[in-house]
Amino acid sequence: MIYRTITKKLVSMARYFPAVGVIGPRQSGKTTLVKASFPNKPYVSLEDPANREYAMNDPRGFLDEYPNGAIIDEIQRVPDLFSYLQGILDEKNIPGLFILTGSQHFLMMENISQTLAGRISLLKLLPFSLEELYKAGFKHDTYEDYIYTGFYPRIYDKNVPAQVWHTNYIQTYVERDIRMIKNVHDINAFQTFLKMCASRIGQLLNLSSLADDCGITHNTAKAWLSVLETSFVIFLLRPHYKNFKKRLVKMPKLYFYDTGIACFLLDIQNRKQLTNHALRGNLFESFIISEFVKYRYNKAQEHNFYFWRDKTGHEIDLIISKNDRLIPVEIKSGKTPTEDYFRNILYWNKISGGEAGNSIVIYGGTQKQERSSGKIIPWKYLTKISAKTGSFARLNVL
């Protein structure tokens, strides 16, 4: 097993809450994580048809089978269990009684958020981070290798070729999970929708345009986008609200949690093809921002990230809101740093009163530089995350 950074937080939360939930995309390693972290707890999967039928037809009897608690895997398959769990958790009030996993966001499922309130600590487990892969010895010299391959565990654990794994993953996701989460009748249209989302990675999300290009209604596009968020395929980066007397765009930007999935949907079939691809910069941006998101999630924290863009086209790729500071981060896929990388940061600092010392460019090269306009940080710095000496700590932004 490749050690997961979130392990300590998971075990810690089980000391305080009667239930701990680990949610995240399918195949992100949730089952492996919880079974390794709680080896003495009985394990039951609701993916198993017999277990699922038992839980659906006799939820109270099913839970009575586990008087000392258990790991219940893919619990979203039987949503009614949450109501019965509420009574058990309140009655016994034992920390770490039940460990739950799910490939949907529980709090985005109908009627569950109230049931769980105050009784569960929810952790989000995404595919491997750069830090985790580096510590396990999976090192690539170029970021293109990581972007193309993606970060899903089975690719590394079982040495499955990325193209083979992504083909099966998308097929399973579309043909099985989507029907379970949302009653999507036109699977072909949904597959087109997925690919069109990938073609908009790192761009402002215009739902009307997306719907038109897919031949679906605005409301359908909105509902399907919610499905992709709920199942941890995409996330939306919201614009920062502070305008500094400038008119701002209000649309979010669309990113994929895993760039390997995005590359597959874009029909990128090898790393060399990625090198000259029109969306290489967008994919690099999604790759870097998702690493920041993983860092926060692994600490059981929601992300504190935004982007900023005014109506005249000035834009900051990533705004980190830390205490009373706003830290601008520009993300550039180029491997040779230039002063032009700081053009939008200089504008931002001028209107916001920001300082060069808090300004960062993360780029595709290898050399760290301290310039009068700010810091230039290589992408590989994101492989050395630790509390005291890691790159995020040295960046002093999280």
Image: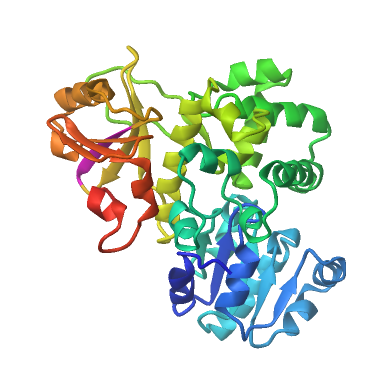
Q: Residue furthest top?
A: 312
Residue shown at the point (33%, 61%) measured from the top left: 386
Q: Residue 244 occupies which quadrant of the picture? A: top left
Does 192 sit above or below residue 132?
above
Does 95 sit above or below residue 143?
below
In the rendering, at what x and y percent does residue 268 appear? 64, 30
**Stretch of the chain drawn in magenta:** 324-330
Residue 58 seen in this snapshot? yes
In the rendering, at what x and y percent does residue 218 appear? 65, 22
Does 176 sit above or below residue 77?
above
The answer to whether 199 appears left or right of 9 in the picture is right
Residue shown at the point (18%, 39%) measured from the top left: 358
The answer to whether 31 appears left or right of 385 in the picture is right
The answer to whether 131 appears left or right of 336 in the picture is right
The answer to whether 234 appears left or right of 360 in the picture is right
Residue shown at the point (30%, 52%) measured from the top left: 392
Q: Residue 167 occupies which quadrant of the picture? A: top right
Residue shown at the point (67%, 44%) measured from the top left: 162
In the rendering, at what x and y percent does residue 225 appear? 62, 34
In the rendering, at what x and y percent does residue 259 appear? 56, 39
326 magenta-colored: yes
Q: Nearer the viewer, residue 54 or 126?
A: 126
339 magenta-colored: no
How was the colour assigned to the protein in this rendering? rainbow
Q: Nearer the viewer, residue 11 or 28?
A: 28
Q: What secondary structure characterizes most of the magenta part?
A: strand
Residue 396 seen in this snapshot? no
Does 293 sit above or below residue 72?
above
